C-alpha cells in the first residue's frame, strides 16, 4: 500500500515510471520547481493537474487523490440536503418532515 500523502504518491509514481521531475514538468506544462513543491508537500495539485498526472502514470484519479474523509463526506451530504430543502415550498417541507418522522420512529432509516 502506498503512502496516503499526495506528495509521496506523486514522487513514488514518478520514480517507478523512470521519470525525472523535468519529464513530468514538461508533460504537465509546469516548472520542475512546481513538481518538486508538490512532492515535498509545499503545493497541492489542482484537479486538472491530478487528472493529467493520473493519465501520465496510468493510475485512476481516485487512487491518486485517495479516499474521501468520512467527516467531509458526512458534511457534504448534510449540505446537499440543506440546499435541496431550501428550494422546497412549505407544503413539501411539511411532507418531508412527516416522512422523516415515520422513518425515524420505525427505525427504518435507509
Image: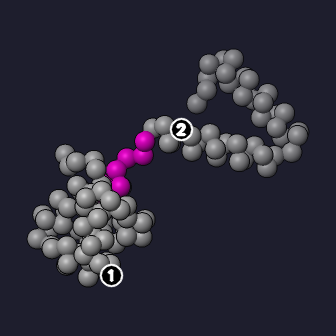
Quadrant of res 9: bottom left
What range of the chain is rendered magenta?
63-69
Work out whether 95 lies above or below 80. above
Q: CA distance from mark 2 to mark 1?
A: 36 Å
Q: What residue did someone put label 2 on?
A: 74
- Total labels drawn: 2
| Observer-nearest of 19 and 42 | 42
| Observer-nearest of 61 and 47 | 47
Q: Is residue 84 left or right of residue 42?
A: right
Element type where label 1 sits in the image: loop
**Residue 92 painted magenta:** no
Residue drawn 12% across the image and 63% down it: 16
The dot on residue 29 is 1
The percent coordinates of residue 58 (x first, y second) are 24, 67
Residue drawn 61% across the image and 23% down it: 108
Element type where label 2 sits in the image: helix
Work out whether 110 lies above or below 7. above
Amino acid at each position: 500500500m502506498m503512502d496516503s500523502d499526495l506528495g509521496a504518491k506523486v514522487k513514488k509514481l514518478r520514480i517507478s515510471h523512470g521519470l525525472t521531475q523535468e519529464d513530468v514538468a514538461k508533460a504537465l506544462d509546469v516548472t520542475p520547481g512546481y513538481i518538486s513543491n508538490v512532492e515535498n508537500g509545499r503545493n497541492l495539485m489542482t484537479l486538472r493537474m491530478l487528472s493529467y498526472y493520473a493519465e501520465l502514470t496510468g493510475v485512476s484519479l481516485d487512487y491518486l487523490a485517495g479516499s474521501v474523509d468520512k467527516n467531509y463526506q458526512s458534511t457534504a451530504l448534510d449540505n446537499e440536503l440543506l440546499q435541496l430543502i431550501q428550494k422546497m415550498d412549505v407544503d413539501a417541507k411539511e411532507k418531508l418532515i412527516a416522512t422523516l418522522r415515520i422513518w425515524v420512529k420505525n427505525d427504518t432509516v435507509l
